[in-house]
Amino acid sequence: MLVEKYKIDQFNHEILNDHKRKFEFVASSVKNVEEILQKLVDFQIAIPSWALGTGGTRFGRFAGGGEPRSLEEKIEDIGLLHKLNNCSGAISLHIPWDIPTNSNNIKALAAQHGIRFDAMNSNTFQDQAGQEWSYKYGSMQHIDKGVRRQAIEHNIEVIKYGIELGSESLTVWLADGSNFPGQLNMRKAFQNTLESLQEVYAELPDNWKMFVEYKAFEPNFYSTTVGDWGQSFLYASKLGPKAYTLVDLGHHLPNANIEQIVALLLMEEKLGGFHFNDSKYSDDDLTVGSINPYQLFLIFKELVEGMDARGMNHASDLGWMIDASHNVKDPLEDLLQSVEAIMIAYAQALLVDAKELEAAQLANDVVRAQEILQGAYRTDVRPLIAEARLRGGAALEPLNLYRQLKVRENLIKERGLKTVATGL
Ligand code: PSV
Ligand code: MN
C-alpha cells in the first residue's frame, strides 16, 4: 500500500492551526529551538525486519493479518512508516530470515522509499534446514571446531550480503552459554568465542563496524558467554577499533543502571549501537517508552551529553535500532509508538541545559540538578516532534493518519489474513 503525499498534506491541513498554537507555546520557552528541530529532523531509527509481523511467546502466537510475506513487503512496510513519520529511514536485516535474492533490486526498492540498510544481524542461535552442525551447545564458543567454523562462515556470508546492500555494520548476538554449572569451561568458552569473532573481524571492510551485543540470560539460564557490558567491552577491546558494544535495553538484570553503562562506554569510545525496547521484568521486548519512559530519558540525557563531549554527530555516529516484539498490537502501530517514544526522550534530553546542570553539580546542588532534569522531562515536547515531522513532509499525527487511512485493513486485503512474516 502506498500513502500519497497529498493525503498527508490534507490531513495536516485540517489540524494545522491547533498544532501551530501548541508548537508556539512550547517553542517560546526553548532557547535554541531551530537547532533542536534540525536535530529532530535528522534523527533516524532503524526498524528491525523481524518485528514487522506479530511476535509470539513459547505459548502461542496470534497473528493479526496482512503481515509482509517477503523482504520486498517488509521494505514497503517500513517505507510506509517512514512516509508517515520521516524518522524510520533505515532497516536492520536478519540473515537467514531476509536473504536478498537480488540485491540490486532490493537496494533500488529501498532507495525508492528513502530507506538505507543499517546493521546486518547474523543468526547462530537457531539451526537452519540443511545445516551440517547443530548450535544446541553454542556456536562460536563450541568445543568442536566444525561448529565454530560454520558460525564464522555464516557471519562472513552476512557481511557479504551487507556489502551488496550498502550496510556498514554487523551485529553479532550469540545465544552461547550454559544451562547448568559445570556444563562448560567458562574461560575456554570465552577464548573460543574471541578467536571466532577475530576471524569474522578480519573479514570486515575498512568502513565497517562490528557490534557485540550482550544479554544477561535466555536462552541459557546459568551462564551467557557475552552476558553483560563488561564482557562485551572485553571482546570489543581485544578485537580492535572497529568493534563496539551494542546495548539492548532489555538485556540487563533488573534495576541495572543503563544510563551509567552508556556514559562509560561512550567515554571509552566503545558504544556502537542500540536496540530500543521496554520491559517490566527482563527481555520483554515491549513498546519503547511504555513501561519506564523516565529511564529512557535518563539514558538519552547521557547519550547527548557524552556525544557532545566528543563532538559526535547524533544522527550518524551511533547505530539506532528498535528491537521489539508485538504480541497483541498491530506491529506497525507499535513501531510508530516506539519511534515516537524515542523521539520524545531524545527531544527532552536536548532540552537539558548542560551548562546549568554542570554548575549545579559543581556546587553540589543536588536539588537544582534534579529540578533541571525533571524540568526537561516534564516538558511536553510532542509539538516539537510534530513540527520536525511537518518540516520533513510527514504527518503531524502519524498514528491517527495510519488509522484514518485504514492501513492494516488495506494490507489484509492485499496480502491476506493468514500471512506469516519471518522473524521471531
Ligand atoms: C536477542 O534477544 C536479540 O535481542 C538479538 O538482538 C537478536 O538478534 C534479536 O533479539 C532478534 O532475535
Ligand atoms: Mn537485540
Image (tube, grey):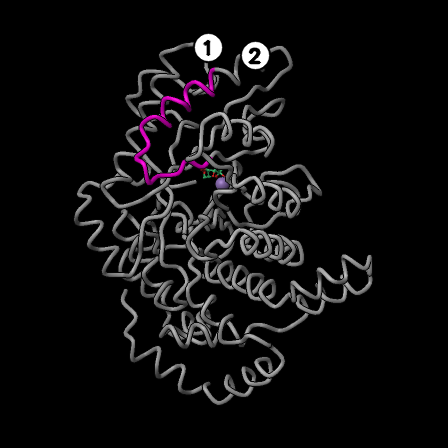
- Magenta residues, start to end: 192-211
- Identity of the residue drawn at 38% across and 66% down: 86
Task: Please check the rendered image and state whether residue 201 is part of the magenta-colored stretch, yes or no.
Answer: yes
Task: Please check the rendered image and state whether residue 65 is part of the magenta-colored stretch, yes or no.
Answer: no
Mark 2 / mark 1, whichever is N-terminal = 1
Residue 78 lies in what quarter of the image?
A: bottom left
Q: Position of residue 51 (x, y in %)?
A: 42, 48
Amino acid identity at mark 2: Leu
Classify residue 345 as left or right of residue 51: right
For label 1, the residue is: 143
- Placement of 208 over or under 31, stated as above or below: above
Element at badge 1? Answer: loop
Amino acid identity at mark 1: Ile
Q: Position of residue 344 (x, y in %)?
A: 56, 65
- Identity of the residue drawn at 49% across and 25% down: 238
Q: Position of residue 117 (x, y in %)?
A: 32, 49
- Identity of the residue drawn at 55% across and 85% down: 24
For label 2, the residue is: 184
Residue 257 lies in what quarter of the image?
A: top right
**Ligand 1 within 8 Å, label 1 CB:** no
Q: Are marks 2 and 1 in contact (CB under 8 Å)?
A: yes
Label placed on residue 231? none
- Placement of 27 over or under 113, stated as above or below: below
Q: Position of residue 331 (x, y in %)?
A: 44, 55
Residue at mark 2 to residue at mark 1: CA–CA distance: 9 Å
Within-10-Å neighbours for mark 1: few <14, some 14–19, many 20+: some
Classify residue 313 as left or right of residue 257: left
- Placement of 318 over or under 396, stated as above or below: above
Quadrant of the image containing the C terminus: top left
- Identity of the residue drawn at 54% across and 46% down: 285
| Of residues 135 and 247, the one drawn nearer to the viewer in this rendering | 247
